[in-house]
Image (cartoon, coloured by chain):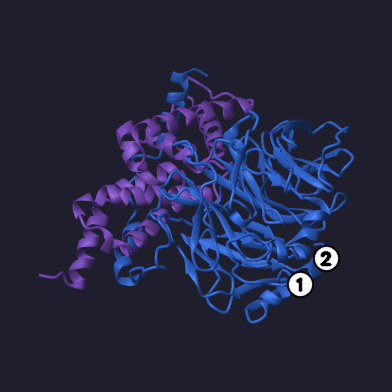
Amino acid sequence: MQETEAERVTAFQRLAELRLDTTYALATAILRNDTDAQDAVHDAVIRAWGRWGSLRDRTRFDAWFDRIVVNICRDRLRAGRYRAATDIADATTISTPDTTAAVNEQIVMGQALDRLKPDDIVVLTLRHFLDLSLDDIAALLDVPLPTAKTRLRTARERLRSQLERDGTDVVTR
Amino acid sequence: MNERDLDLALARLGAQYVSRMAPPALRARVRAVPTETPQRRSWLPRIDTGGFSMVSALKFIVAAAIVALFGGFLLAGVLTTHQGDEMAPAAVTESPSPMTAEELLSGMVTEEIEPGVFRVDNDGVRDLTSIDGWLIFAGHDGSVWLEASGELVRLGDVQTHDPRVDESDVLTDLEVAPGGTVWATIGPFGPGRSLRSFDGEAWTIHPVVEPLGKDDSWLFVEVTPSGRVWAVSYAGIIGYVEAEGATAQTIEAPKFDNPMDLMAFVATDSDLWVPQWTGLWHYADGVWDEIPYGDPDTGAMPDGVFWALGDGPTGTHEILHRHDGTGWRRWTLAEQGMSPGWGTTPQEYATAPDGSFWAGWTVYVWDGAVNESRCGVSRFDGLTWTRYLPGMCVGRLDIAPDGSVWLAAAEGDGSEWDLLYSLYVITPEAVGASE
């Protein structure tokens, strides 16, 4: 029996909402900005809905939707609006024994990340912010495992170079 | 910093972001999508075997940033050589001379916000206000191409392009030859990665190097007035397509400071100029040599003005180098009126046919934290900075052969990152009118 339009809408809404927290965290980690993360997820939902008909196996929705979110976040990074600006409001809310050092570290690291290429930011975020395995990263980026490894290694090297180039070092505790 | 410290620092930065729950407002927006948004229509029929994603250009995040002008010969070439020398495939339109902004704007809905400066609200086909994430490409033929959300359009043309295979394909650069043939590099790692041309009907893949390394992809494309197409790969391979599209060759590039930072280059039919951190690499007659930015005794420069952006003391690209054919001069952007303060960062930059340098910029004033930002767009002729569109932040900028400057801009001070852009054009008539 063919699915009615209302059933299609309901099915999509249900899956999207179930995945919302995960993808919002994903977008927030990559973009490091709440507002942009919301916009990115919203864009992803629009894009996913636009292609809903092409998703034949709905059990694969999560992976499919995650990939859309990552791609949209990467596009937004590439659009160049993420530059040497760390979300200070967020950084200053961190509760640590040494707030000044922590904030300084966040700013320095955030700025160094901002100067990397979007692909580097994405792979570093997936690995170090979200603690995803290389297998998961490869799947999310739709690349072979060795490629994911190479990208991560290269991104780390570039981050380190950027930190050195900035003439600053992250405060370590 | 050792590996462990780097891991820990990254983990600490990430810890503040990863546990957030989607706020109610987002839930409401998401819930409304299927009832408010029609499903996307089918795009144009797929062309050839590959995909084509028009998403974004990495030029915008340039590390070793540079802009250059091929002196007068580029403009001269644009104006005089495109008719007979245009390479195959056939041009979209055979135009006797590049379209001017005035011609392009006729029939469009515009508002003149300053003398000679227009906001383009509608190009006769589509609403152009409040677009999220525009890319702008001004072609050698005078056409202007826009890309947003994976959709590529030519201004004033009803046709819409999105021949991507999947969303891992990204448009990394686009050039329009004088006769109208569109050249694009697709990357970085998706199935559609390639150098492609569009003749108005079909996209053609040009396997300049086959195969590229598995982690390599074409990043930039440059079309000379005679039709030679240069392409640069992510890993620093430089290749070109001969006229008629028949031959593809590569040349061996030196080991640059960081091949992955090879973000822009300038080419004539025979010469290449590749910017790096410390100087400019020049290729001619099979030989590479480096021209340090501070070296006044250089003989292998393009016949004209060459602008380059290098790193400043704060780590941002705030040293502006200019070569006038006899030697380098340099300025600190902050000292030259672009904007005072810490971290003046050109967001977009281009060289105009008259040899002037244009930049959309943002300045961050640093006081232990980013506590102030401003942005704007300025023109520098080597002596004087002139600012346009005060109070506007520039997302993208490109300059057409007639000297008109096309911008995606939005009101703001640089502190907001989710701006919705409108399309503006600064016509040649407006150049010279200072703030």
Q: Which chain is purple?
A: A
Quadrant position of residue B308:
top right
Q: Nearer the viewer, residue B132 or B26?
A: B132
Q: Which chain is blue?
A: B
Compared across the picture, whether B199 is left or right of A70 comes to right
**Subunit of mark 1?**
B
Q: Nearer the viewer, residue B46 or A113?
A: B46
**Subunit of mark 2?**
B
Q: Nearer the viewer, residue B365 or B82?
A: B82
Instruction: Give the residue number, with chain letter if any, for mark 1.
Output: B116
Residue for point 24% across, 61% down:
A12
- At label 2, the amino acid type is Ala
Instruction: Give the residue number, with chain letter if any, for mark 2.
Output: B433
Compared across the picture, whether B106 is left or right of B135 comes to right
Q: Is residue B200 above or below residue A172?
A: below
Q: Residues within 10 Å of mark 2 (few under 14, many from 20)?
A: few
Q: Where in the figure is residue B44, as x and y percent of width and height?
A: 42, 68
Q: Are marks 2 and 1 in contact (CB under 8 Å)?
A: yes
